[in-house]
Image (cartoon, rainbow, N blue to C red):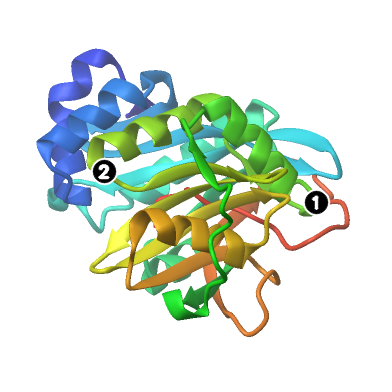
């Protein structure tokens, strides 16, 4: 039986989450306390066994100034004892049915590897979201602006910055204030660099993660600042040995383009013209 989860399912959900995603108990508790909603989390239950789960996080698709609700399918997991029995396929099919019946436009997801790109491709998902990977070293950066300053991270301001930075995309996957507020809280809890900054009339916000002595910039929303100047501000604060920036496809000359996210349309939708599709802050 597939149904939406309930709070009393948590003691069984936590071990499955930790087994599937190799998260600590602390990280698992953090997610369930601050981001999970049971009426967005499907489970597959049979004979008292929790066989699998799938989360349907709300996300908007913005195209040509119009906003369409969609779902980001996340935390798709099957208990090791029940793998190979079609549990994930059944959960995906049910989540798609619910999304379609609600009139929402599409299902999005971010596969964790090539095998999962193939798995979802066989189920009708298309890879439309890519990012350009630009690598910079400190010696390639301009001087940091003397008036550069840090600001307290603010979810509402981040939503606005991302709208300005990515709104001209023909398909922009837009997280709401609640979703970005969770990212801010998680970054603080796990000491992931999240910097909101300004210089002159420009401003920006960068979500980063450390990779050894290097920093991966997983989301960089800028208004009135260019990428090298923003990276110079980051370097003033982080002093990393190198920076790997994930930028919108087509934004960086000579960068490597990386497949990232997939989509399956569940209701009629015709994207407007514009820049390449953009999705970030998804689990990869």
Q: Quadrant of the C terminus?
A: bottom left
Observer-nearest of 165 and 226: 226
Report the residue at 74% width, 41% height from top: 62
User: Residue 220 placed where, x, y %?
Assistant: 56, 53
Q: Secondary structure at mark 1?
A: loop
Q: Residue tagged by mark 2?
A: 191
Report the residue at 48% width, 76% height from top: 136
Q: Quadrant of the N terminus?
A: top left
From what the image shows, is residue 101 above or below residue 261? above
Residue furthest front as drawn: 146
From what the image shows, is residue 283 above or below residue 29? below
Is there CB contact under 8 Å for labels 2 and 1?
Answer: no
Q: In this rendering, would 133 be left or right of 237?
A: right
Report the residue at 70% width, 29% height from top: 103
Q: Secondary structure at mark 2?
A: loop
Q: In which quadrant of the rendered view does residue 277 lie?
A: bottom right
From what the image shows, is residue 235 above or below residue 71? below
User: Residue 80 placed where, x, y %?
Assistant: 15, 52
Q: In this rendering, would 15 be left or right of 101?
A: left
User: Residue 65 placed where, x, y %?
Assistant: 85, 39
User: Residue 172 placed where, x, y %?
Assistant: 69, 48
Q: In which quadrant of the rendered view does residue 24 lie?
A: top left
Observer-nearest of 259 and 275: 275
- Residues under labels 2 and 1: Cα distance? 32 Å
Q: On residue 125, which mark appears?
A: none
Q: Residues within 10 Å of mark 1 (few under 14, many from 20)?
A: many
Closer to the observer: label 2 or label 1?
2
Closer to the N terminus: mark 2 or mark 1?
1
Do we see residue 224 in this rendering?
Answer: yes
Q: Residue tagged by mark 1?
A: 168
Q: Residues within 10 Å of mark 2 (few under 14, many from 20)?
A: few
Do we see residue 124 in this rendering?
Answer: no
């Amino acid at each position: 039986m597939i149904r939406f989860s309930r709070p009393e399912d948590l003691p069984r959900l936590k071990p499955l989450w930790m087994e599937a995603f190799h998260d600590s108990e602390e990280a698992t508790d953090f997610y369930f306390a601050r981001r999970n909603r049971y009426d967005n989390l499907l489970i597959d239950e049979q004979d008292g066994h929790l066989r699998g789960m799938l989360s349907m996080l709300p996300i908007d698709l913005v195209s040509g100034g119009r906003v369409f609700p969609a779902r980001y399918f996340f935390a798709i997991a099957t208990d090791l004892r029940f793998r190979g029995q079609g549990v994930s396929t059944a959960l995906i099919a049910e989540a798609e049915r619910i999304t379609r019946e609600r009139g929402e436009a599409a299902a999005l997801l971010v596969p964790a590897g090539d095998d999962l790109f193939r798995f979802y491709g066989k189920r009708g998902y298309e890879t439309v979201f890519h990012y350009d990977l630009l690598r910079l070293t400190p010696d390639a950066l301009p001087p940091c602006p003397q008036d550069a300053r840090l600001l307290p991270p603010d979810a509402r301001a981040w939503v606005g910055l991302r709208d300005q930075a990515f709104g001209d995309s023909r398909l922009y996957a837009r997280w709401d204030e609640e979703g970005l507020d969770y990212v801010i809280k998680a970054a603080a809890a796990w000491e992931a660099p999240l910097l909101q900054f300004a210089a002159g009339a420009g401003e920006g916000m960068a979500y980063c993660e450390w990779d050894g002595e290097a920093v991966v910039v997983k989301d960089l929303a800028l208004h009135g600042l260019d990428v090298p100047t923003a990276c110079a501000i980051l370097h003033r604060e982080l002093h990393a040995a190198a920076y790997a920036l994930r930028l919108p496809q087509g934004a960086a000359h000579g960068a490597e383009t990386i497949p990232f996210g997939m989509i399956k349309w569940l209701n009629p939708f015709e994207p407007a013209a514009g820049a390449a599709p953009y999705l970030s802050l998804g689990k990869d």
